[in-house]
Amino acid sequence: MYGELGNKLVQHAKRTQSLTHLPPYQTEMVRAVTREVRDLDKDVAAILEPFAGSFNPSTEPATACALLVNHLCMRRDKRCLLAYHRVRSDKLEEMCWNGIDVLERQQQQQQQQSKAGGEGATSMGAEGNTSSLSPEEEEYVRQYSDLLAAYKGQWTDIDLTGSLEPPKDLFIDVRVLKDAGEIQTEYGAITLTKNSQFYVRQGDVERLIAQGYLQRLT
Amino acid sequence: MDIDDILAEVTADAVPQETCDLQELTRAWVTERVAPEILPYPDALMERVLERIRKQIELVEDQTGNMDPKTNFKLIVIQTELERFKFLVRSFLRARIAKLDKHPLHIFESHTNDPTLLSPSEHQYLTQHQALLSQHYHSSFLSQFPDALQRLDDTTGGMSMIDKPDEDTAVFCRVLREVGVVSVEGTDRVFEMKRGDVWVVRWSAIRQRVLLGDIELI
């Protein structure tokens, strides 16, 4: 009661900020904090009921104090919840900007986990949903990437999600880390096979570097 | 008007529009990255720059395949310049988006007062993103809150939920034209800013001068 759980959520959020991946959504805790707010609201209503709308704080300082504490706690809980969700959605947005397909990655993770679970014990059915996103967050990611795509679509020449490092050279050396197939450049097609090295135009391979297929050599 | 001003006018006339635009764009980019609040969108400038980028891309596409070493070399120069321009525009737009994401409600309010602040597409992004966010909060927890606590832009209780950028933050600036005596609000500091001077001042004290182009941020 009185903000303890909210504090835990904020600690979770703080930790999330320094992580590269997104830890599992604290469904239980979010629900508990929401419940706390509703309970506090009921308390407030119950305290105010006997006064029938004619409550005078100066005649009942003790009750006024209780009310104030309840009100402040509700606001604090709300703030904690907002902060927790904002940190997570910020993280998701950042992933969208970096061209990481969050949902696909989640599915892969789930498949891997269910595989590992299936080998160990067959009675792991209880952990059916191991996604670290809440359903609401998945929906949010979907809609945000649509929004981002729409905004980016207006700047096709610029490629908004491109590198934010100032360009120094037009051409760079890259090493291929994973087979990426054939790419088309204006100097003809290049087949990117693992461990080979190329001297290519930066704009042509930027995407592949971001996706981890190529490594830039300096 | 002294000799410097006359010289400035003469050189300004001699410089072609393209060079001016580059200088203007670079200045807008630096200012946007340094200033704590979002600045009016340079509509005409952006249109000119984007138009030129499009033309150059067309030119490059036209000329590729031409194996004449002379044109080839020219193309490399053009492409390098193109990449740099694209970087400037990209970084500029991303800096603005970052600000939009940070203080959405505050910027929304300012934009309502001054519709030149954002470009139409930025405004669209802002509204849609904000709608997505509040929908996300609502479906995650806010819908179960008591009615009085469901708002995201609550200003009651002595605390505003709308985050504002810190307009009193210090910025580095260089004086481009004589501006005379400047006083910092809230303090008794008064000083004279001369052409060529470099100062560290509160953003709020020189905001108007920067918008007029008398002072540039560095």
Image: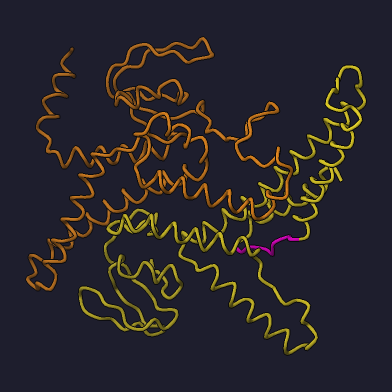
Chain colours: A yellow, B orange
Q: Nearer the viewer, residue A78 or A19?
A: A78
Q: Quadrant of residue A106?
A: bottom right
In which image quadrant can residue B111 be found? Answer: top left
Please name the residue shown 71% across and 45% down the image: A80
**Relative horizontal placement of residue B69, taking residue A154 as reference (left or right):** left
Give percent across and percent down for residue B166.
Answer: 53, 30
Vertical position of residue B50 compared to residue A204: above or below: above
The location of residue A13, given as percent across then percent down, is 68, 52
First to last magenta residue range: A21-27
Count of numbered labels shown in the rendering = 0
Q: Nearer the viewer, residue B14 or A161?
A: A161
Q: Magenta segment: does it hold B44?
A: no
Q: Left or right of A193: which side holds A7?
A: right
Position of A72 compared to A187: left or right? right
* Image position, residue B147 (x, y; %): 70, 41
* Main secondary structure type of the part rendered in magenta: loop
Rendered view: B75 above or below B3: below
Instruction: Give the residue drawn at x 37%, y 59%.
Output: A162
Residue A94 placed where, x, y %? 51, 57
Q: Looking at the picture, does residue B204 appear above or below residue A87?
A: above
At 82% from the left edge and 48% from the top edge, which residue is drawn? A36
Which of the 4 image quarters holds residue A131?
Answer: bottom right
Placement of the N terminus of chain B among the 4 image quadrants: top left
**Which of the two residues, B185 or B151, is positioned nearer the viewer here?**
B151
